[in-house]
Structures are given as C-alpha cells and as structure tokens.
Image (cartoon, rainbow, N blue to C red):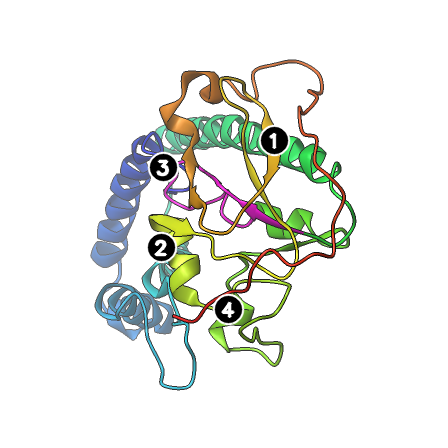
C-alpha cells in the first residue's frame, strides 16, 4: 500500500488492522490452522520478507539483487489474502473496505496524474533533441517511497535516444554490457549511484550528453548540454513550490528547450574509477 508518499500510511494502517481481525477469526474458527498449506506459505513468505537481506551481492556481477524484502512483501500480502479468504466479512467491514479503496484510488490518481504530467514534459523536451542523443535525467521527488522518476527517461528514450545513466548494462548481469570508453552510457555503477543519491561529476564522453532538468523558476523541463567537469545534482521537485504545482495546469505546456544538433567532435573521455 505504501506506493508513493506518507499519506498512504492511512490506508495501510486501516488495512493492517482489518487483516489482523480476519486472521484472529481464522485462527479461532479453525482447530488446525497450521494444516493449511496456504497458511504455511504465508508464514514462510512473511519470514523471508523480514529476515532476508534487502540486497544480495554476488562475485560475478558489479550490481546486486536489490529490493528483495520489498518484492517479497507483495507475495506475502497475496498469500495472506488467500489464507483469510474464507472468513465471513460483516457489512460494516465491507463498507470500510470500500472507503479505504476509494481513498487509495484517489491518492493514486492524483499522484499518477502528476507523474504523467512530468513524463509528458520530459517527452516534449526530448523531442527537441536529434535522434540517438545521449541524455541524463536530473529530476527526482524525495516524497516518493519508490523512485518513480528515476527511470522515466529510459522508457521515453526507446526508439529515439539513449539514457546515458541507465544502470542495467553496467551491472554485468546481461549479455549486453557497458565497456569503458563507450559512447552510449556510463560504465561505473559508482557514478550511477552518485547521480541517484549524491552528485555526479561528469567526466565527459565521446559524444555530446544532455541533461534533463527543470527550467529556473518555471514548472517546465529544459535540456542543456553537459561539459566535462560539470556537477550534476538531482533537482528535487518537492523543494520548489513552482515545481510542486506541476500537473495542476490545464492543457499541454511547451518547453523552453533549445539545443544544438549532435556534433561529432570529442568532448573528453570517461576516465577510470
């Protein structure tokens, strides 16, 4: 239930209380609840979500298997629904569930609408670039539990550009891997981690690389070309009042982006770690 922000705690708390009540009823009505295989699976999955480490690192890859507890929590919730599915629900509880669902969907609709607006702004900014341009997104929202804006540029770049900070090839977990000095993306996971959580000192690349960021003082997204040695810091939408209003305007907006065409001259070369 904790999808985007802190306001979802209201729905999560209500749902947790309701599940506890149903679980108590199930245990009271069944003389041998431990004989139910679904109950066994739920207990095991819940224990795995709590006890397993959140990230597992292996010697073969530079990237780890992350968000393990977060992913298992969804399976645990599904198995809990199956374990208490035979318990009779009172009409007042059904009404409470409908109310909780309505609150959750209203929260989700508002957040998804705002995120969709940001995605539309990014798509309009990317449309000003030449085909196969290299881009880095410098936009985040610290209020979100899940970094929903982290990989929007990668999806929008399909068929039109390259996400220069895409972390997947650098993990070495796929046949397509990033080698130092390539002209398509960063090769060091430490650089990608710095971009996501701290700041990245751009070392340069064999081709021009552009940054997606918010226009100063305006709720719009612009693109500008990065230069070697420039610091790239994620701009937090929650820290700027004009940016927090994004998604409240009516109709499409225009971007103020104006960038030169891709050039073939070298602007540096990515250095080693």
Q: Is residue 270 above or below residue 61?
A: above
Q: Residue at x 43, y 71 (%)?
A: 272
Q: State the image coordinates of residue 220 (x, y, percent, origin top left).
A: 59, 24
Mark 2 vs mark 4: which is more N-terminal?
Answer: 2
Instruction: Looking at the image, tell me whether mark 3 or mark 2 is earlier in sequence order.
Output: 2
At label 1, counting other C-alpha atoms closer than 10 Å, the crowd grade (few under 14, some 14-19, many 20 or more) is: many
Residue identified by numbered label 3: 142
Q: Does the magenta portion include 139?
A: yes
**Left or right side of 134 for 89:** left
**Which residue carries the number 4 mark?**
187
The secondary element bearing badge 3 is classed as loop
Q: Is residue 17 visible?
A: yes
Quarter of the figure with the N terminus: top left
Q: Of the residues tagged 4 and 3, which is closer to the observer?
A: 4
Which label belongs to residue 84?
A: 2
| Circle 1/circle 3 CB separation < 8 Å | no
Residue that label 1 marks: 222
In the displayed structure image, the side of residue 22 where residue 182 appears, left or right: right
Estimate how packed mark 4 is, as few (under 14), some (14 to 19) or many (20 or more) residues with alpha carbons within 10 Å. many
Q: CA distance from mark 1 to mark 2?
A: 51 Å
Q: Name the residue nearer the viewer: 64 or 273.
A: 273
Q: Is residue 121 above or below residue 82?
A: above
């Amino acid at each position: 239930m904790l999808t985007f922000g802190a306001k979802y705690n209201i729905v999560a708390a209500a749902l947790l209380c309701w599940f506890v009540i149903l679980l108590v009823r199930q245990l009271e009505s069944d003389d041998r609840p431990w004989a139910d295989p679904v109950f066994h699976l739920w207990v095991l999955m819940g224990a795995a979500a709590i006890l397993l480490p959140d990230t597992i690192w292996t010697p073969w890859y530079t990237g780890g298997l992350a968000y393990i507890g977060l992913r298992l929590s969804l399976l645990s919730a599904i198995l809990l629904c199956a374990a208490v599915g035979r318990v009779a629900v009172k009409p007042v509880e059904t009404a409470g569930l409908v109310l909780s669902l309505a609150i959750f969907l209203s929260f989700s609709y508002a957040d998804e609408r705002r995120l969709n607006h940001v995605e539309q702004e990014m798509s309009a900014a990317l449309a000003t670039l030449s085909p196969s341009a290299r881009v880095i997104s410098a936009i985040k929202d610290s209020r979100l539990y899940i970094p929903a804006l982290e990989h929007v540029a990668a999806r929008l770049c399909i068929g039109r550009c390259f996400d220069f900070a895409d972390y997947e090839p650098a993990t070495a977990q796929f046949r397509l891997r990033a080698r130092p000095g390539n002209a398509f993306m960063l090769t060091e996971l430490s650089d990608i981690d710095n971009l996501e959580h701290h700041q990245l000192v751009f070392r340069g690349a064999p081709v021009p690389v552009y940054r997606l960021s918010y226009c100063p003082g305006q709720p719009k997204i612009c693109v500008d070309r990065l230069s070697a040695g420039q610091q790239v810091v994620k701009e937090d939408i929650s820290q700027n009042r004009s940016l927090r209003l994004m998604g409240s305007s009516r109709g499409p907006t225009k971007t103020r982006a104006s960038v030169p065409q891709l050039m073939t001259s070298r602007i540096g070369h990515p250095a080693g770690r």
